[in-house]
Image (cartoon, helix red, strand yellow):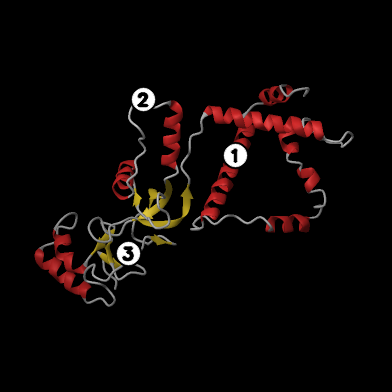
Amino acid sequence: MEHSIFQPLDGLPVIICKTCQHGVWPREIVRHLKDGAHGKTHQEAVQIQETVQRWEGIAMGPEGVVVPHQIDQAWPGLPTYPDGLLCRRDFPRCRYIGRSMYSMRNHWRTVHGWTRQGSRGRVTPAERTRQEAEVRRSYIVVHCQQIFPSRTGSHYVHVRGGETEPHIPVRTEQVDEAIAAVRQAVDEAQAQAPSGAGEDVRDANSWLRVTRWTQYLQDFTTPDDFTTLRALVETPLPDSDNPVEQRVRRIWEAMEGVVRKSQQTVQHTGQAIRVEAVRSEKGQTP
């Protein structure tokens, strides 16, 4: 089935145009080649169409062809877009993918009957933040491909792998409350710690010591011990339909982001800033 213009698509009875990088039904080849970038004469187009229609296992039209909504590996010959927006308003039943917030909002309104706007009138900053967070929870960024540019089978297909959660804004008050809660927990731990325990939750590197890893991991002393420990940590599946697994994945990615940002902060701040940060801790001197 070698041809200079068309090639079969792996796994489907479909052909794609190498130049245009999208699918073409064999019975529409003449029209395709006479228009656009090809500019073939009618006679040339007819000859090519007759040749392709003799290929085995190729459907002449969309009848009976099911284009999937999700694949594990990208199809060669088709462009892959990293900006797909996968709807999660009715996941996993809804598999709609758009490539703009305009199309996604139109989908939410027409299919799910949902919009971000609440009651009319003045919107408070807190309500605006809540609405924006609800929007961000309603989709996930994915890689996608499209076989046909229009009509039957033209939906975007999710290429699994590389999914990212959109940033969800958090109100400043919530951050302040979280910091206050952590400080209170540290104070309580300090008050309850037995005297002479040899470990002060407020001494240098206090955030690390609050975790008490040195206490919990004191029995892990050999490389084999840490290999066993790593084996107990199972990465959440990125594409599981299980709601619990999805929530665990979000927590996993959020904590990974915190660690990465913390490392970047340490790497890009000067020594003087780090010394001052330690000095500002209650009762601490560098």
Check disc 2 and report the residue beneath it: 122
Question: Considering only order in the chain, which callout, 1 or 2, is on the residue closer to the N terminus?
Answer: 2
Most foreground residue, 183 or 164: 183
Q: Residue 148 placed where, x, y %?
A: 26, 59
Question: Considering only order in the chain, which callout, 1 or 3, is on the residue closer to the N terminus?
Answer: 3
As drawn, is 270 to the left or to the right of 122?
A: right
Rounded to the nearest whole Å, what is the CA distance between mark 2 and mark 1?
34 Å
Check disc 1 and report the residue beneath it: 258
**Badge 1 amino acid:** Val
Which numbered marker is on residue 67?
A: 3
Quadrant in which the N terminus appears: bottom left
Mark 1 lies on a secondary structure that is helix
What's the residue at 31%, 47% (across, down)?
107
Rounded to the nearest whole Å, what is the CA distance between mark 3 and mark 1?
39 Å
As drawn, is 284 to the left or to the right of 17?
A: right
Quadrant in which the C terminus appears: top right
Q: Residue 282 placed where, x, y %?
A: 75, 23
Q: Residue 42 placed where, x, y %?
A: 10, 64
As drawn, is 209 to the left or to the right of 195?
A: left
Most foreground residue, 241 or 145: 241
Residue extending furthest toward the right: 196
Q: In the rendered image, is residue 268 in sight?
A: no
**Badge 2 amino acid:** Arg
Q: How many C-alpha atoms fall within 10 Å of the one at disc 1: few (<14), some, or many (≥20)?
A: few
Height in image: 255 above or below 227?
A: above
